[in-house]
Image (cartoon, rainbow, N blue to C red):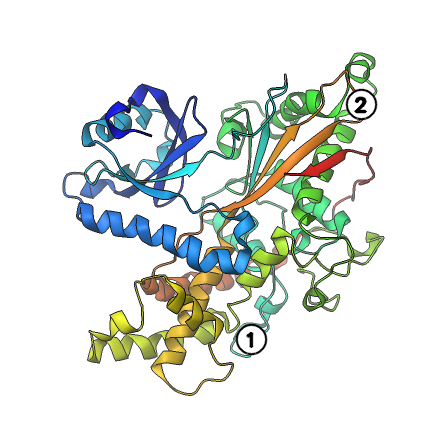
Amino acid sequence: MEPDKLDESDWRYHGEGNKSLVVSHIQIPRVLRLLKYPAADSENPPQTAEQAYRQIQNIVDFTSNVMSSFIGEQFIHSGEVVKLPLEFVRQLSIRVQHHRPAWRCTKVMDIYSGCALCLPNLTTPLYHQPTLTPPLCIEIKPKCGFLPTSKHVSKEIKTRVCRFCMHQHYKVSNGIWKKRSLYCPLDLFSGSRQRMTFAIRHLIEEPQNNFKIFKGGQLIYSSRERDRDDSDDGSSDFVASLVNQLRPYFTCATQRISGLHGNKSLLNDFIQVLVKALLSGGGASTVDSSHRHTEGRSFCEASAFNRERLRHHSQGLPSDCVLSRVLHTQMLDSLDIEGLFPLYRRVEQHLHNFPKERSRLQVEGPYDEMFLEKLQKCPSEDDGSVEYAAAKVHQYRAAMTAKDCSIMITLMPTTEEDDAQQRSFSFSVSVLDLDPKPFESVPRQLRLDQKVVNGYLRNSSGICPRTTQPRDDCTTLLFHPV
């Protein structure tokens, strides 16, 4: 990518999060991720170009040196920092503005530093075969997949109801979402195909920010796309629309003409492909024994899944599948935010007395091998030192990154619809959004935890009723890792 040949008309809006905005090239499988800051600072940027460059380089270093060690480099794309012409960035900001959701426009794109993170566009993979059916890419934000067992947890409800399910009540009561999602991360991380199927089905029904589908690089399914449907039954209509989009991938021409492949069966085939991808990466016999939680510990009481209908008890996740890697990284949060906060205060007080120690304790990096070693070799018992406290805070930061990451599943049809009765796919699985969480975010996380838990306790009657469990049997789909 040559900076002097960049043309803003070759780029389109791709999406955005809380801290960055992403644009994708219309021909080359590349995306640019640009920083954002509050609109109030639009004429007075909060940091210099050098600071912006360092912030993005920190993302690259944290991803490649820290998170890849925990999650596995086979799942990671670190990207590289690029310098862009300022005029190109300004014109690009104007071009994408009207595509942005209104609720995201409280922040503006950084047009002053000229710095961006360049990454592969996983929604339009370079290596896919030129078939009539373009590749599908599914983005899942799985969130936290375990219940805390720390002795520091003060509210017993946190050991029975997962953070995501409690947070749903908080978000609906505060008007962030109109409808509560029945997705529960503990079902997805269970390793049980039945529970995983149930979880993904509810992600599809209520995607919020946790589920998106791209077809040939174009976003075709998300909460933003669904909200454009003004009908009274927009949710069911939009799922039906999704099924029509998926039909060429999961039925041959004769089935479509005869109508043999019903909507429920087709959607189930799609879900089974996602389950297989999430469990891929190792032999079926390789199971991580540390995930063999007792039955009570592996269920969230707010989950809509009916345990009585569980046909097979799962032994856990294959140790080298992406979900297992993400879950292990999340479990670096061994103390819970309540147990971690006193350690954060210990470091904070030490830095107040000795400001120059920020560098030695690597509060803002660098995220190198020494930083990783501090995480990996942190003692299990508190020796009262500031070094122990800093290492536990760094572990927590890595865990929070894993709790907020995105899993991208790219599916590429390898046979055309008339070639075989069984549709064959090649696939790849990647993990994105692995930015380091700020050291200073710990107090905010504690306040949010208290708000979410107290809000849930005020509405404790809101634990979900059990819903009907659909059948999860399906036709055989050939599946090949890339």
* Residue at the far left in the pictured view: 44
7 horizontally vs 405: left or right: left
- Which residue shows up at 63% across the image and 19% down it? 131
Q: Secondary structure at mark 1?
A: loop
Give the CA distance from mark 2 to mark 1: 48 Å
Image quadrant occupied by the N terminus: top left
Mark 1 closeness class: few <14, some 14–19, many ≥20 residues within 10 Å: some
Q: According to the image, label 2 marks what residue?
A: 261
Q: Which one is nearer the viewer's eye here, 325 or 309?
A: 325
Mark 2 closeness class: few <14, some 14–19, many ≥20 residues within 10 Å: some
Residue 252 lies, with reference to residue 13, above or below; the image says: above
172 horizontally vs 135: left or right: left
Q: According to the image, label 1 marks what residue?
A: 150
Q: Which one is nearer the viewer's eye here, 339 or 390?
A: 390
Residue 439 lies, with reference to residue 38, above or below; the image says: below
Amino acid identity at mark 1:
Ser
Which circle's residue, 2 or 1, is located before the other in the chain? Answer: 1
Name the quadrant containing residue 441. Answer: bottom left
Residue 471 lies, with reference to residue 422, above or below; the image says: below
Residue 322 lies, with reference to residue 226, above or below; the image says: below
Q: Position of residue 282 (x, y in %)?
A: 70, 52
222 horizontally vs 10: left or right: right
| Residue 465 visible in image | yes
Q: Position of residue 391 (x, y in %)?
A: 41, 73
Q: Position of residue 67 (x, y in %)?
A: 47, 57
Name the quadrant containing residue 100. Answer: top left
Look at the numbered discs 2 and 1 and tell me whether their residues touch, using CB distance below 8 Å: no
| Residue 46 visible in image | no
